[in-house]
Image: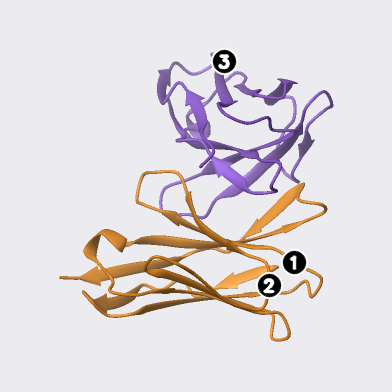
Chain colours: A purple, B orange
Amino acid sequence: GAVVSQHPSWVICKSGTSVKIECRSLDFQATTMFWYRQFPKQSLMLMATSNEGSKATYEQGVEKDKFLINHASLTLSTLTVTSAHPEDSSFYICSARSAQETQYFGPGTRLLVL
Amino acid sequence: QKEVEQNSGPLSVPEGAIASLNCTYSDRGSQSFFWYRQYSGKSPELIMSIYSNGDKEDGRFTAQLNKASQYVSLLIRDSQPSDSATYLCAVPIYNFNKFYFGSGTKLNVKP
């Protein structure tokens, strides 16, 4: 199956700093990538949809200036959590949509903001 | 009404039994359906997809689709403790630019 990677797999940072998470589709081109957040024992929450070469579409309630998304190529999307605070601590998961219209998930990034 | 609904469970079955996971969706125009498995602390992984009415089998997994009833299910035969996870049903919309996920059904397979 298609492989999606994320880097880093976990990160600990101080409050007020920015954190960048990379999502790569390794063996296919993804015109669309998705960013999700998941808190413990809760459902996946879609944050934004990222299309290559265009601005991301954010879900209601997600601050676009706080969660910056860049999808500069068909294999790479990045999510930057700006001025992170403890309430931003979560499990961030990206996914990529293949040409066969299937969504494949990355392994996720655990963010802990102290 | 949510776009995709699943019973949150937990669903407990003994090892070796058949586990039946169900999902209903609201958009009658939906054409594609996906099942994902998510182990605790991990990201979802694709199990299988189904597009046509009827059954689709892949190893111990069988997906069943009934578009008239807007119902898709996943059967797991010979359930193993390693199948214990949360199973997510997903339905794409808007030309696959968005996927609606159910809240997931937690399955416990007891040895």
Q: Nearer the viewer, residue B76 or B52?
A: B52
How far is mark 2 from mark 3, CA to CA? 45 Å
User: In this rendering, does residue A114 appear at all?
Assistant: no
- Local SS, label 1: loop
The chain letter under disc 1 is B
Q: Residue at x 62, y 46 (%)?
A: A103
Q: Is residue A113 left or right of residue B98?
A: left
Q: Nearer the viewer, residue A28 or A20?
A: A28
Q: Is residue B32 left or right of residue A40?
A: right
- Local SS, label 2: loop
Residue depth check, mark 1 versus mark 2: number of the one nearer the observer: 2
Residue beneath label 1, please?
Answer: B31
Q: Nearer the viewer, residue B93 or A68?
A: B93
Please identify the quadrant where the N terminus of chain B is shown. bottom right
Query: Which x, y percent locates residue B65?
Result: 62, 77
Q: Is residue A4 above or below residue A42?
A: above
Residue depth check, mark 3 versus mark 1: number of the one nearer the observer: 1
How far is mark 3 from mark 1, CA to CA? 40 Å
- Mark 1 or mark 2, earlier in chain: 1
Q: Residue at x 45, y 35 (%)?
A: A107
Whether the residues at callouts 1 and 2 have beta carbons within 8 Å, the answer is no
Whether the residues at callouts 3 and 1 have beta carbons within 8 Å, the answer is no
Please identify the quadrant where the C terminus of chain B is shown. bottom left
Residue depth check, mark 2 versus mark 3: number of the one nearer the observer: 2
Residue beneath label 2, please?
Answer: B52
Callouts 1 and 2 on one subunit: yes
Q: Residue at x 47, y 54 (%)?
A: A42
Whether the residues at callouts 2 and 3 have beta carbons within 8 Å, the answer is no
User: Which kind of residue does numbered mark 3 sit on?
Assistant: Ser
- Graded by Cα atoms within 10 Å as few (under 14), some (14 to 19) or many (20 or more), the crowding at tag 2 reads some
Callouts 2 and 3 on one subunit: no
